[in-house]
Image (spheres, helix red, strand yellow):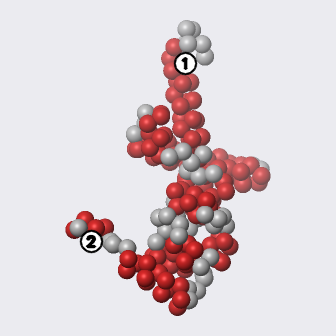
Amino acid sequence: PEPDVDAIGFEEFLGELKVARVLCSWISEAPEDDLLREFHVQPGDLYRLVETARWLLYASRELAALLGDREMAVKLSVLMKRVEHGVKEELLPLVSLRGIGRVRARLLYSHGFRTLDDLRRAHARELLKVPQIGPRLVLSIKEQLGVPVGDEEREVMRKVEKVQKSLLEYAKG
């Protein structure tokens, strides 16, 4: 719409464009603080946009499946997961793990752990070198992947855990 002819229509268009840009930035892994600052939205607004988009993508995927368009249903399913987690497609396998969100997934990916098989093969010592990945999370990842954790790995994790302070211990001084 032309801004001089249809001011209300133009405002609505700008609002829709803003939503599209926010969601595009979200699935491109823009930091949440950057999104809030750049687009002047509040955390609750971002959450609402993501949830609404996820629901619309879910409904669209179901319609595509009902209409027999399997290819479109698969594409919509991937996009729905990307919107849900705020990640690029390459991180979807990693964010499928409990305890791994968009930030930890990107850190793992950047440190060479790009697939679930990479995580299965990794020794605890290697995973513990990744920022924001602690012993409990390593154990959880291994359990989720059905990988037995050997005594040597458990000992490495015990040593690291002893060194780390809990938040309460840290707050006490």
| Residue at x-position 41% and y-position 44% | 43
Quadrant for residue 3, please give it: top right
The residue most toward the bottom is 151
Q: Is residue 61 visible in this depiction of the protein?
A: no
N-terminal of the pair, mark 1 or mark 2, is: 1
Residue 119: percent from left, percent from top? 62, 73
Q: Quadrant of the C terminus?
A: bottom left
Q: Is residue 4 visible in this depiction of the protein?
A: yes
Query: Looking at the image, which is closer to me, 142 or 1?
Result: 142
Residue 138: percent from left, percent from top? 51, 75
Number of numbered callouts drawn:
2
Look at mark 1 in the image and give the residue it sits on. 10
Residue 121: percent from left, percent from top? 65, 78
Query: Looking at the image, which is closer to me, 84 or 105?
Result: 105
1 sits left or right of 33 in the view: right
User: Label for residue 135?
Assistant: none
Instruction: Classify 10 Å Cα crowding around label 1: few (below 14), some (14-19), many (20 and above).
Output: some
For mark 2, give the secondary structure.
helix
Residue 132 position (above or below residue 69) = below
Q: Nearer the viewer, mark 1 or mark 2?
A: 2
Look at mark 2 in the image and give the residue it sits on. 169
The three-letter code of the residue at mark 2 reads Glu
The residue most toward the left is 172
- C-alpha gap between disc 1 and disc 2: 55 Å
The three-letter code of the residue at mark 1 reads Phe
Residue 11: percent from left, percent from top? 51, 21
Query: Looking at the image, which is closer to me, 169 or 91?
Result: 169
For mark 1, give the secondary structure.
helix
Residue 107 position (above or below residue 168) = above
| Residue at x-position 33% and y-position 72% | 165
Residue 72 position (above or below residue 145) = above
Quadrant for residue 150, please give it: bottom right
